Image: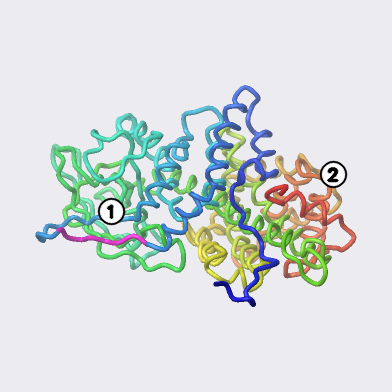
Amino acid sequence: MAATTHTVTNQVPPLVGHDVFATDRVLSEAVERHIEPGILPVALEELGELGQAAGSAQAQKWGAQANAHPPVLRTHDRYGHRVDEVEFHPSWHRLLGHAVSAGLTDAWGRPAGHVRRAAGFLVWTQAEAGHGCPLSMTHAAVPALRTDPELAAVWEPLLTSHTYVQGLRNPREKAGVLFGMGMTEKQGGTDVRSNTTRAEPLSGEGGYLLTGHKWFCSAPMSDGFLVLAQAPGGLSCFLVPRVLPDGSRNVFLIQRLKDKLGNRSNASAEVEFDGTWARLVGEEGRGVRTIIEMVAATRLDCVVGSAGLMRQAVAQAVHHSAYRDAFGGPLIDKPLMRNVLADLALESEAATVLGMRLAAAYDADTDQERAFLRLALPAAKFWVTKRCTAVVGEALECLGGNGYVEESGMPRLLREAPLNSIWEGSGNVQALDVLRALSREPRALDAFLREVGKARGADHRLDAAIKGLLTELADLAGIEARARRLVERFALVLQGSLLVRWAPPDVADAFCASRLGGDGGAVFGTLPHSLDLASVVARARPSAG
């Protein structure tokens, strides 16, 4: 019998049973903007199906279960044989299987493939972010393997397959495979040129034997890996298969799984190579150049994945505030809460619009767009991934104590939020990469300025920010120490220009006032009170119910 004191009122219904794609106006508008009409109906249908799945109670249950039961390492079987396998909860496989079947590893060979995949990745990240790692690595391996047409002919159809096949066996017997990556080592971290793993060529076989270790190896249950090692000709890129052509296991010694802050459903490992067979990818001594396109593609996923986390956090905060009463009415109608929600919505919209613009540049694949990506991608990766943690933390606070409880799902989002800022190069690495692009590739700055110049004259605060950026670039004294400040300005000017061109006037006005015009504080909820904040919040609401 229920206690008479336990009447439940004023509790928010769960945000479940909605189409994550269709109720995201910003994302759906971006898809319609960047995909040509002949392809658009098919893209909208596939994204709608994925959006409905992502918002379902079933997917939410899978995400919770995959995180409540992290992967387990099995180094040996019952007889003492080395097996080096990672076991995952069935819900992990269901999430991964659904993502692969939805084409989230297939972008390089289909029309508007990068925009379609980026939109899907943003949507499906909101169901559970941890399994995005193998999806990203598998997708990103394609351009690196294309440096060797023979390898690409074998592996690309398997990497881009829409069929998920669980378990390790000969890739020739599988309809689809997953790939991981191993670059960093204990002594070097991001300084991959200091890697000590050795690659000894085998005479007459075209293969190499690797000896060494990897401090971080992504997705160790994958079928193959791209790794860096020191060959006689210098640092080189290699393909390491888990299962060799004769069906035997390659030497791939998983020493332990990392115990991480977040990303709990995903396995990250320390791996030893001891006579491990590998195939050279590209030329000896050009390993970084070979693998850099893989790194760039995964950096885009860092931007899009962070945009997905932001969107889910903001959607939860707006949904909660729409149903929760306090001080005589719904929280969403309170001026101060409305200011906070609108500020969060601005950050989420700017991240989504930027991520989708970068994906569209990949699809265009022109010299101009490649030059644009060279500067815009590391700047976006720097800024969006850093803003993610702040957005999720503030959104959690909008739910109050309810948001601090695991059942709300918000703590899982908060633990996940810092990951993309670290993965594929921390903030300083991205900032230095922007400086490198400025010094070595002048076309990158020209392409960037042409892009932001498309909005010139539409907002005086944006015009002033562009002028300020050019002034900053004119003074190269102490440029490395100023790199973070400079890259932040690159990102904000680019976001502002995109919003001025494509967002509703209320959104663009609020962004330019607070991010470019100086009329905003250091915390969320400090937008000018004279703006139409109600319309900004309404745009971010995940459902009409």
Colour pattern of the rendering:
rainbow
Q: Is residue 333 magenta?
A: no
Query: From the viewer's perspective, is residue 258 above or below residue 537?
Result: below
- The residue at the far left in this view is 79
* Spatial CA span between label 1 and label 2: 52 Å
Relative depth, front residue between 291 and 325: 325
The magenta stretch is 70-77
Query: From the viewer's perspective, is residue 494 above or below residue 102?
Result: below
Q: Are marks 1 and 2 in contact (CB under 8 Å)?
A: no
Which percent across, then down, holds residue 262? 46, 65
Relative depth, front residue between 274 and 109: 109
- The residue at the far top in this view is 38
Q: Amino acid at mark 1?
A: Gln
Q: Which mark is residue 230?
A: 1
Look at mark 2 in the image and give the residue it sits on: 458
Q: Quadrant of residue 66?
A: bottom left
